[in-house]
Amino acid sequence: MMKKNSKACKAAALFVALAALAAAALFCGCSKKSAPDAYGVYSDFDSVLAAAQKSEKKILLFFTKMEDGGHNEKIVNDILQAGGYNELFGGEFETCRIDYSRERFSRKSEGFDEAQNERDMRTAVIYGVDTTPAVVVLTKQGYVISNITYLPVDDPQGLKNIVELDRENIDGIENLLAQIDAAKGLERVQKIDELYEQTKANYRYQLRGLCDQVIKLDKKNESGLVGKYLLARASTKAMDCYLRREPDKAVDCYLEPLKSKFLSVEEKQRSYFAAAYIVGKDSPGVESSEKIISYLKSAIELDDKSPLAERCRFLLERQEKILANQKEMEEKKAAEEAEATAENRAE
């Protein structure tokens, strides 16, 4: 029980961290498909995803910042544009490289493309990229297989050697996806859950379509997993709110699942906890503090002996002190304003 709730707290913190980053990116619509360059490398994620769907290949997604030189330049000059890259990787992978040099995001730069920049920022957000260079191995659907810690390599074969170190995982995910495609009903639900558990928490956003399938396939909650995936869907919907620059709507995504009879007590507590956590990231005033306190109290009331309830009590005590200070400051401000108004009238 402690382990599960510990994971819940970490997951909530991780979500908010990602959401904060996402708030900086503008939501983008559909893009025009672009062709690969002379070396067969795409520069637009939507385009490489479409190509992978057609060719049935996996994706190697590179993130660079060429203005920093070093390994960023090496990836381009010594790997992607080197002879032998396509021979080694082209049969299995489609390749995409997105560059995040500051110059291309300046409106003064030649060829400035705001829509493309917005799409590229969104790609960085949903794949959790915060440093470059980075290399991510994806399925044809865009699901993350692994994030390669980039090691200095001198040629395509060096990169191939790194990718091969993860071969067992790559083949395992491919096999599991084939099993999901072949399965139906509750068997499909179980296989989706297996993939979900094998995917790191910060990459589960991409699985949102499969998560929705669980809810649709198991209308009576025979698997006992529907509550879990209602929360998973709440997380992706909340992320979408940040991507649309509508953070005020994110908290509602976690309150909606509470209406379901399939949520366990623990899952309901996690919903309230996530709601409180999200509101708490907005430098709250009195109204927000009161909401946070309400959500924390609701979580505690569900099971006051759970580890998560203990965490909520700690936060509740702190938030009640914050609220008392906020009210005191508001009263002081109101008194000062009233005094200033009275003085003005007297003059």
Image: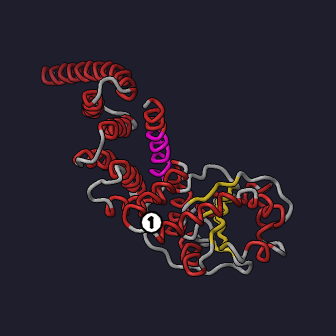
Q: Is residue 82 above or below residue 132?
A: below
In depth, the one of 89 and 226 nearer the eye is: 226
Q: Nearer the viewer, residue 249 or 256?
A: 256
Image position of 169 with respect to 116: above or below: above
Residue 212 coordinates in the image, percent (x, y): 36, 61
Q: Which residues are magenta?
A: 11-24
Q: Residue furthest right?
A: 154
Residue 286 can be seen, yes or no: no
Q: Going 30% across and 41% down the picture, which residue do you hit?
A: 264
Quarter residue 81 falls in: bottom right
| Residue 332 shown left or right of residue 203 in the figure | left
Residue 68 is situated, as x and y percent measured from the top left of the image, at 74, 54
Type of amino acid at the residue the image marks with label 1: Cys
As for residue 302 lying within the magenta part, the answer is no
The residue that appears at 51% across and 67% down in the rendered structure is 179
Using the image, determine if residue 34 lies above or below residue 155: below
Q: Quarter holding the C terminus? A: top left
- Assign a secondary structure to mark 1: loop
Residue at image mark 1: 28
Q: Quadrant of the N terminus?
A: top left
Q: Residue at left 43%, top 40%?
A: 12
Q: Main secondary structure of the magenta part?
A: helix
x and y percent of residue 173 in the render?
59, 61
